[in-house]
Amino acid sequence: MSSRTIVTIDREAVRRNVASVFARSNKQIFAVVKNNAYNLGMIEMVATLMEAGVRHFAVAEVYEAIEIKTNFPDSYVLAMNPASHFKEVRLHGVALGIPSLDWLTRHQADLSGIELHLKVNVGMNRFGVSSLQEALSVLETVREQDLALTGLYTHFPLADEPGADHDGQVERFLEITDVLRTKQSFPYIHAENSATIVKHDPRLAFCNYVRPGIFLFGYSPIEKMDWLIPSLRMTTEVVEIRQVEAGEHVGYGTSYTAPETIRVAVLPVGYGDGVVRGRSSLPVIINGKRYPIISKLFMSHTFIAIDSTVQIGDKVVLYGDGIEIDDITRTGTANNSEQMCARSWRLTHRYL
Ligand SMILES: *Cc1c(COP(=O)(O)O)cnc(C)c1O
């Protein structure tokens, strides 16, 4: 039996977003499908992305990479977190990121036959070599051990932060890569996440791949992009309607007090289903009309203020029809990946 709250994921939207990203960047795509493809279902999304022509995928962990390689032997998959389990990595043909010289030194004896992409740290301070000297020592180790270093990449943490020194971070990447590229060739060079792609930075023209995640699924971490098509829709139903008198509250606590006698609808969905509390910053839609969420969201229930036209059983749009994940994001109450990742798979999901 299906839940009354239904999630619909639009695969055609994803395919069209791929085409748009490709047209705008004019580069091949390393699709980031970490965290179950931003919680849209990794296997379904990889299949959809492959239909749209994508062959290269990036994930955080080796187990995710192996799942992709097992289901899609034609794919190329890079696991970016510091890895172990090198026997399985080699067996499944997964490529690995080099997070530091130290990691490479510790594991050099286990890495033969595994493709490696060297990561450069430009300021996130998560993974990657941080100096030219460290990068050159990596190249030396690779040469001594006869390892397969085929990729070079970085990640820009300030691309979606207005006023931050993103430019300086691009310069740091260039300082290191300009030298490395004189030492050997790299078939895969990738740096641009979604927010960086739309900067069209000519200094990054030498990167032959872009590495977007959120754009592919139709959402923007920066300003509104009218060419993106949201892939996720969520609807529920009114399960109860009641009159609430002036001065009364709804749900737990006193976060809402009725200013006058109002009509209230109860929805069977809440933060337990992964609808984040920030969702209450914008209305829901019933029969094309907007109604405000009142009080906080609760674990399994949400309250809305309605007019006399709303009836029990009416369909309620939580995401879709012009109120999208990005619109909540722009209220500053919950970012878009957070809203996607919070959503529970206990809800009934349908792929279009
Ligand atoms: C998540 C991630 C991306 C994709 O970022 P988006 O903002 O979703 O495009 C790219 N590279 C790395 C290393 C990431 O962790």
Image (spheres, rainbow, N blue to C red):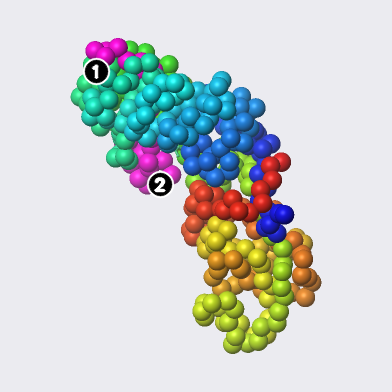
Image location of residue 234, percent across then percent down: 66, 54
Which disc is residue 196 wearing? none
Q: Is residue 25 visible?
A: no
Horizontally, residue 137 falls left or right of residue 84, namely left
**Image quarter (top left, top right, bottom left or bottom right) of the C terminus:** top right
Among numbered discs 2 and 1, the one appearing first in the sequence: 1
Q: Secondary structure at mark 1?
A: helix
- Check if mark 2's residue and mark 1's residue have beta carbons within 8 Å: no
Q: Where in the figure is residue 253, as x and y percent of width and height?
A: 51, 79
Which quadrant contains ligand 1? top left
- Dot 2, how many residues are within 10 Å of its Cα: few (below 14), some (14-19), or many (20+)? few
Q: Nearer the viewer, mark 2 or mark 1?
A: 1
Residue located 58% across and 32% down the image: 46
Mark 2: which amino acid?
A: Glu
**Horizontal side, residue 240 vs residue 204: left or right:** right
Q: Position of residue 154 (x, y in %)?
A: 37, 31
Q: Residues within 10 Å of mark 1 (few under 14, many from 20)?
A: some
Locate residue 143 relative to residue 65 in the image: left or right.
Answer: left
Q: Quarter of the image containing the N terminus? A: bottom right
Task: Choose between 188 and 196: the one closer to the eye.
Answer: 188
Give the residue at x 23% y 29%: 102
Determine whether 42 is above or below 72 in the image. below
Q: Disc 2 designates what residue?
A: 161
Rendering coords of residue 144 (x, y %): 24, 12
Q: Which residues are magenta?
A: 143-169
The residue under label 1 is which amino acid type?
A: Thr
Residue for badge 1: 141
Does residue 207 belong to the magenta stretch?
no
Q: CA distance from mark 2 to mark 1?
A: 36 Å
Please tell me which residue is depicted at 55% across the width and 66% down the height of the picture: 299
